[in-house]
Image (cartoon, grey):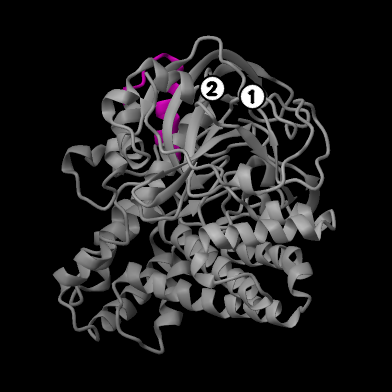
Amino acid sequence: MTLQLDIKDKFNEQLPADPILENSRRQVRNACFSYVVPKKPTKPSLIHVSPEMAEAIGLNASTTKSRKFLDIFSGTELLPDTSPYAMCYGGHQFGSWAGQLGDGRAINLCEVEHQGRNWALQLKGAGETPYSRSADGLAVLRSSIREYLCSEAMHHLGVPTTRALSLTLSGDEVLRDVLYDGNPAYEKGAIVCRTAESFIRFGNFEILAAQQDAKTLKALVDFTIKHHYPRLGVPSKETYLKFFKEVAVRNMEMVIHWQRIGFVHGVMNTDNMSILGLTIDYGPYGWLEGYDHGWTPNTTDSGQKRYRYGTQPQIVLWNLLKLANALYPLIEETEPLQRILDEYQEEVKVAHLEMMKSKLGLFLSDVEDKALVEELENVLQLSETDMTIFFRNLADFKKEDSASEGLKVVEKAFYLPDEIKGKIMRQWHNWFEKYAKRLRKEDKSDSERAEAMNKVNPKYVLRNYMAQLAIDDADRGKYELIDELLQLLKKPYDEQPENEKWFAKRPEWARHKVGCSMLSCSS
């Protein structure tokens, strides 16, 4: 049996390849990728397949149940006439240039076209590459479940993202030190097949600029425009500026979605920024439980908190500056690049305000809207308040309701309801009075407003403890919860009364549990 895929490789056929074919750690120059084949797993077994993604690349349900599907997407076999590869890229990590990084444990199988769309198919955790540095190129079940669940959840929330096709156990044990505390342990190995139009990152351009390889840099930029931004036209300085502007806009839209749903990426290094504005690399991510601008799930960042929730839009700007520096050799003018960065700073403020207004059900313009939003953001952080529950239940507030009735509407969002008294109570009352007054200026009815709010404020997100419950079950060989959560998260804005148990605050046992409140890059 063969898999009927319309393979149309472009990246590894139209861009310069590393001439060295051996799979050894090395510095790669004048190339965009290195050829490498996946490591054959000892005893692969399929845990889950996304029927939606299988259909998107042109496979039917029966095919995904075949041995051939398992062999291909575990890395046991290669697709005919394909040349798998690992991409070369660099990056700024936590604000500092890290030099060459590259696909250290991701191997691109091929590109597929189906129904007018291009899909790159990539195995994460499929073994060593020239970019693995001191690592083994493998991934564990824990992190693989998190990526598999979250990428699909984000898609259904309406957030630009890479996708996931399959989740496979490798049958191998993988040694990991979860908290980098000197206590490594063996865990089950796993492989995720993730998919996207392209996995090109900011870092792909940065490494070529750092190497002063203008020829390969131009080849990569021209390739990216031709295949992923074709409407921008033929290569020229003007086209390159349009390209940079488009990348800035797409990444701004992506991060505003993150802020809307309370998603914290955790490790927004430039090598984790997609040139297409997709959420990419689901590592130590997390979802806001209590609304907190200072929260990050990444233990590696616990001191500096560089990538905390409240700074994510500004980090995108910083990363865009690094991309501008990488593109400069092709443009040779700083002023137009700086102008685009300045535009981002203004446009992201407008986009954030509009996003917050949509969460509050405000559709008309009012000079007091910015102050109303800022006051809410402050009062939400006075006592731990569940972001998802607060905004979802706020839709039930009526424009003629009193402040006291408003607090009753959102009371289930408070983790410590006994704290809502005195000064905190007065601040909430003050905000609800202003909010009710503002709502009375709107021309939508309460029910129309509630319907609109419930389309931007999800009822169900992949809370950190939910993913951990699925991981704990999977460690015991039980995989039903993975599918249950995937089905739940396909309709995050629907009421789903049969799944009400998941519309709840984080349980207390999960407050300080590893995997629920703190994570590392160890995966």
Question: How many residues crowd mark 2 within 10 Å: few (<14), some (14–19), many (20+)?
Answer: many
* Label 2 SS: loop
Q: Is residue 58 visible?
A: yes
> Would you name the residue on which mark 2 appears?
75
Quadrant containing the N terminus in the rendered view:
top left
Q: Is residue 397 visible?
A: no
Residue 27 in the image, given as x and y percentages of width and height: 83, 39
- Residue at 80% x, 48% y is 30
In terms of sequence position, does the residue under pointer 2 or pointer 1 come before the other? 2
The front one of 469 and 290 is 469
The front one of 381 and 501 is 501
> Would you name the residue on which mark 1 appears?
127
Q: Is residue 167 above or below residue 248?
A: above
Left or right: residue 139 versus residue 338 is left
Left or right: residue 497 versus residue 392 is left
- Residue at 40% x, 75% y is 354
Per the image, is 312 magenta?
no
Q: Which stretch appears magenta?
A: 462-480
Residue 218 in the image, given as x and y percentages of width and height: 72, 61
Left or right: residue 393 versus residue 289 is left
* Label 1 SS: loop
Quarter assignment of residue 245:
bottom right
Q: Is residue 123 above or below residue 207?
A: above
Residue 16 in the image, given as x and y percentages of width and height: 72, 46
